[in-house]
Amino acid sequence: MQTLEANEWIWNEVGGAEIAAYRDRMLFRPSDHTGRAYARSTANGRLRTLALFYRWCVAAGLTDNVPFSTSELALSRRQPQGFLAHVDASGGRQLANELTIRQTSALPKPLSPVALRRVMAGLGARDRLIIEWAVTTGMRRMEVAGLRLRALPRSSLDALVAVKIEATKGGKTRTVYPPLPLIDRTLAYVREERAVIVRRAKLRNADYAEADAVFLTEAGRGISARRVGAMFAAAAGTAGVTASFHALRHTFATAMLRFLQRRAQDEPNLNPLLTLQVVMGHADLSTTAIYLRVLATDLTLVESSVDELYGALLQ
């Protein structure tokens, strides 16, 4: 709608040329919000949304035609796709239009321990903890931002502690297993730095209500997922590391899969891939299986991650 307004286009009079211009703007100009180039998957996702919107408009009698041609394709979920098509709810039936962009399937890129230390250098306690939660549990940025005080255990004798998180992708509660030293450092942050932030917020505003979020901004509000991502992007940029916050989840997944493979040598009943699927909260095992390809690509990097990041805590 912003594009329509900026170009003075009428929504039900646009054609293939206008849609192609919208696509090319995403391909050749960076995002106004992030300053980075759009991923091809993002561009294709927006084209898919447009296709669904105009199909609905035709069915509802709001317009007479869809402004681009489509054809139905039957594709296997396991078949690598040369381009991202318009996916309907049937799973395996897709609508592809002539404007979708060819894209290659890129493997997840875990961070090396050296790169991770460079990113974390110079960060304050809160931001270091946020990164540690992500890289030792596989939590997404929305999940770390949504971590609640009530979810933190007060004591445990186990090396790994079960913590239930509710602010998840899909809204389904799942359990993560942060190492006990991380729990201890987080509780220390709550008692010290976070408590100071809360006291200052109460002094500024008598009506201030303390948020249940573990990680707070200086204003005393729960940190947002967007701010978490921006914090990591800034730290990575300063360190000269090209990575997004989601790379921490990839780092955890590849290291944990390798760790589970090691354990399976002594525990034949352990299925590393199925176990990782549960830990990651993946609905589809094929999503988890991507990390097998990462191991096959650079096992040395993953081995170093297991030994340096997780070895002392998990073995």
Image: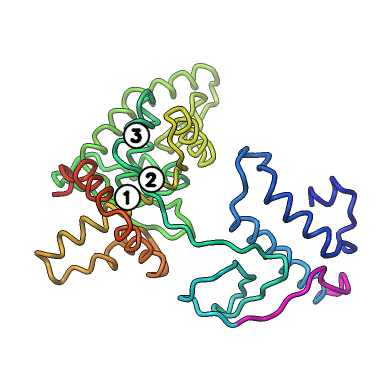
Amino acid of disc 1: Phe
Give yes or no for contact between labels 1 and 2 (Cβ–Cβ under 8 Å). Answer: yes
Count of numbered badges drawn on the protein: 3
Q: In front here: 243 or 164? A: 243
Is 257 placed left or right of 100 in the picture? left
Q: Residue 91 appears at what percent x and percent y?
A: 54, 77
CA gap, disc 2 to disc 3? Answer: 13 Å
Residue type at numbered disc 2:
Leu
Please report whichever mark, 2 or 3, sits nearer to the chain's N-terminal start. Answer: 3
Q: Residue at x 48, y 37 (%)?
A: 228
Q: Residues within 10 Å of mark 2 (few under 14, many from 20)?
A: many
Residue behind mark 1: 252
Q: Which residues are magenta?
A: 60-73
> Image quarter for residue 263?
bottom left
Secondary structure mostly seen in magenta is loop
Q: Are marks 2 and 3 in contact (CB under 8 Å)?
A: no
Nearer mark to the viewer, of 2 and 3? 2
Earlier sequence position, callout 3 versus callout 1: 3
Residue drawn 59% across and 75% down?
Answer: 89
Mark 1 Cα-neighbour bin, 10 Å: few <14, some 14–19, many ≥20: many
Q: Which residue is mark 2?
A: 248
Which label sits on residue 129?
Answer: 3
